[in-house]
Amino acid sequence: MAVNRELLESTVNVIRQSLQADGGDLALIDVNDEGVVTLEMQGACAGCPLAAYDMSEGIERILIEHVPGVTRVQPAI
């Protein structure tokens, strides 16, 4: 199932608002045909020791739940 890019972007933008309130940010880098979403933590989130946890347990869960076709979230390298 192809991921609806517009729905993905709007969902990421909602998540970004929470991160921006704490001095961080989030950038959508890519989504592939298998539903793997690549995100980059920015600002205060980039160096935060909890960023990996936030991405796997928070952001990934939200995206899988709200955007059909998303299978996994990975950090940008």
Image: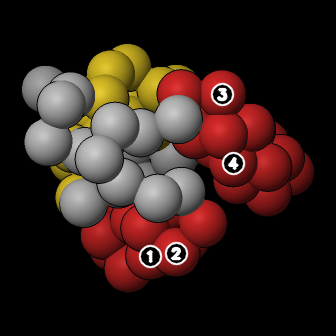
Pointer 2 residue: 65
Q: Position of residue 52 (x, y in %)?
A: 29, 62
**Residue found at x 35% / y 54%:** 70
Q: Are marks 4 and 1 in contact (CB under 8 Å)?
A: no
**Residue 72, quarter of picture:** bottom left
**Residue found at x 79% / y 57%:** 18
Residue 77: in sight, yes or no?
yes
**Residue found at x 31% / y 29%:** 31
The dot on residue 28 is none
Q: Residue lying farthest top? A: 29
Pointer 1 residue: 61
Q: Secondary structure at mark 3?
A: helix
How packed mark 2 is, by other alpha carbons closer than 10 Å (few <14, some 14-19, many 20 or more), is few
Kind of residue at badge 3: Glu
Q: Earlier in the sequence, mark 4 or mark 2?
A: 4
Q: Secondary structure at mark 4?
A: helix
Compared with 55, 24 (above or below) is above
Pointer 3 residue: 6
Q: Nearer the viewer, residue 44 or 28?
A: 28
Q: Earlier in the sequence, mark 2 or mark 3?
A: 3
Real-space Cα separation, disc 2 to disc 3, in angstroms: 16 Å
Kind of residue at badge 4: Thr
Q: Is residue 47 left or right of residue 72?
A: right
Q: Position of residue 76 (x, y in %)?
A: 23, 29
Q: Earlier in the sequence, mark 4 or mark 1?
A: 4
Q: Nearer the viewer, mark 3 or mark 1?
A: 3
